[in-house]
Amino acid sequence: GAVVSQHPSRVICKSGTSVKIECRSLDFQATTMFWYRQFPKQSLMLMATSNEGSKATYEQGVEKDKFLINHASLTLSTLTVTSAHPEDSSFYICSARDRADEQFFGPGTRLTVL
Amino acid sequence: DAKTTQPPSMDCAEGRAANLPCNHSTISGNEYVYWYRQIHSQGPQYIIHGLKNNETNEMASLIITEDRKSSTLILPHATLRDTAVYYCIVRVGGGNAGNMLTFGGGTRLMVKP
């Protein structure tokens, strides 16, 4: 099946700093990528939908100025958590949709903000 | 997308079949049933999906009732590595439907030796 990678797999940062997470579709082109967040023992919650070459669509309650999404190419989307705080600590997962409308998930990035 | 209802947890003995139920009584005619699973601290993994016919692949079988209001995912010979949270999701599929996957609570399957 199609492969989606994320980098880094885990990151620890100080409060107030910004962190960038990359999501890449390795063997297919993805016009749409999705970003999810998952807190411990909870399900995945969709944060935003990222379309190549256009602005991301954010779910209700997700601050677009805090979670910056860039989808500059058909194989790369980035999520930047700006001015991170401890409450932003979470497991961030991306998925990419191929031309057959199937979604493939990345392995996730665990963010810990001290 | 229609909502789904799954039991929060299930146990299964290693080597036995695991049957995971899902209710989706408000499913629409153009909505597919998808199953994903998530092993601890990993991203979700696609298992199988179907519209109305039963489906089988190398991982599992999907049995959808004739009225499409419920389905069952069958892992024929569960192993310890199948311990995971299993998510049943319904969504419009195919083409440029543009629908994201909405995750519910899922079923936490524990395969025991």
Image (tube, helix red, strand yellow):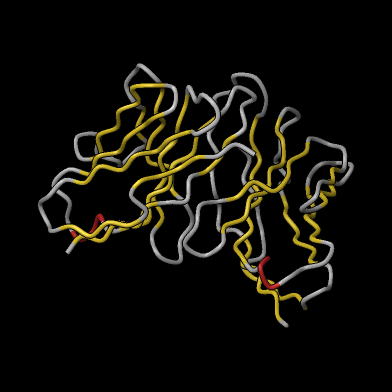
Residue drawn at (33%, 50%), measured in percent from left and top? A8
- The image shows residue A15 at horizontal and vertical percentages of 12, 57
Please report the residue visible at 55 percent of the width from the left and 27 percent of the height from the top: A28
Residue B16 in the image, given as x and y percentages of width and height: 84, 72
Say if A68 sits above or below A53 in the image. below
Q: Quadrant of residue B73?
A: bottom right
Depth check, front residue: A29 or A84: A29
Choose top left, top right, bottom left or bottom right for residue B13. bottom right
Q: Is residue A58 left or right of residue A102?
A: left
Q: Is residue A63 left or right of residue B70?
A: left
Q: Is residue A35 above or below residue A32?
A: below
* Left or right side of A3 for B7: right
Give the percent coordinates (x, y) of residue A93. 42, 47
A3 or B66, nearer to the observer:
A3
Q: Which residue is found at the position 57% from the left and 27% from the top?
A: A98
Q: Residue furthest bottom?
A: B113
Q: Residue furthest top?
A: A53
| Quarter that holds the N terminus of chain A | top right
Location of the C terminus of chain A (image quadrant): bottom left
Above or below: residue B32 compared with residue A54: below
Report the side of B2 relative to B70 (left or right).
Answer: left
